């Protein structure tokens, strides 16, 4: 019986918290995703690049290609043995 009262109390508190949140946010349109993402980023020369002008780290791409080739050669050697 006590467990039902405890769970009922917890449910009431959760419902009240949801209602308060809805009441506080009434009439406000949600911000667009782009605006929400922009607010978390600092405006530096690195983050303010024109679209399509992102730099590609070619060294890391080449390193990954070499690693993939080595891994592929090792897997072929293991199969042949």
Image: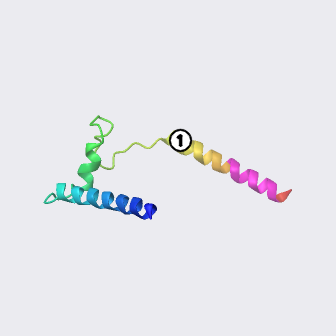
Q: Choose top left, top right, bottom left or bottom right for residue 31.
A: bottom left
Image-based side of 66 in relation to 60, left or right: right
Q: Position of residue 30 (x, y in %)?
A: 21, 57
Query: Between residues 72 and 35, which one lies in front from this camera angle?
Result: 35
- Asked if the stretch drawn in magenta spans residue 45, the answer is no
Q: Position of residue 24 (x, y in %)?
A: 18, 54
Reply above or below: 81 against 55.
Answer: below
Query: In this view, which residue lies farthest toward the right?
Result: 81
Boundaries of the magenta span:
70-79
Query: Between residues 37 and 47, which one lies in front from this camera angle?
Result: 37
In the picture, which quadrant includes the N terminus? bottom left
The residue carrying pointer 1 sits among few (fewer than 14), some (14 to 19) or many (20 or more) residues within 10 Å by Cα, namely: few
Say what secondary structure mark 1 lies in. helix
Label tally: 1
Instruction: Determine which residue is flagged by label 1.
Output: 60
Q: Position of residue 32 (x, y in %)?
A: 23, 56
Image-based side of 67 in relation to 50, left or right: right
Query: In this view, which residue lies farthest toward the left?
Result: 27
Q: Position of residue 68 (x, y in %)?
A: 64, 50
In the picture, which quadrant includes the C terminus? bottom right
Query: In this view, which residue lies farthest toward the front?
Result: 1
Q: Which residue sits at x=26%, y=52%?
A: 34
Q: Which residue sits at x=16%, y=59%?
A: 26
Q: Which residue sits at x=26%, y=49%?
A: 36
Image-based side of 3 in relation to 26, left or right: right
Image-based side of 63 in relation to 51, left or right: right
Q: Which residue sits at x=26%, y=45%?
A: 38
């Amino acid at each position: 019986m006590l467990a039902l009262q405890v769970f009922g109390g917890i449910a009431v508190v959760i419902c009240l918290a949801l209602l308060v949140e809805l009441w506080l946010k009434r009439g406000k349109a949600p911000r667009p995703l782009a605006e929400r993402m922009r607010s978390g980023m600092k405006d530096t020369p690195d983050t303010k690049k024109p679209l399509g002008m992102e730099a590609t780290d070619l060294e890391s791409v080449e390193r990954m290609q070499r690693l993939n080739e080595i891994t592929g050669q090792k897997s072929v050697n293991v199969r042949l043995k």
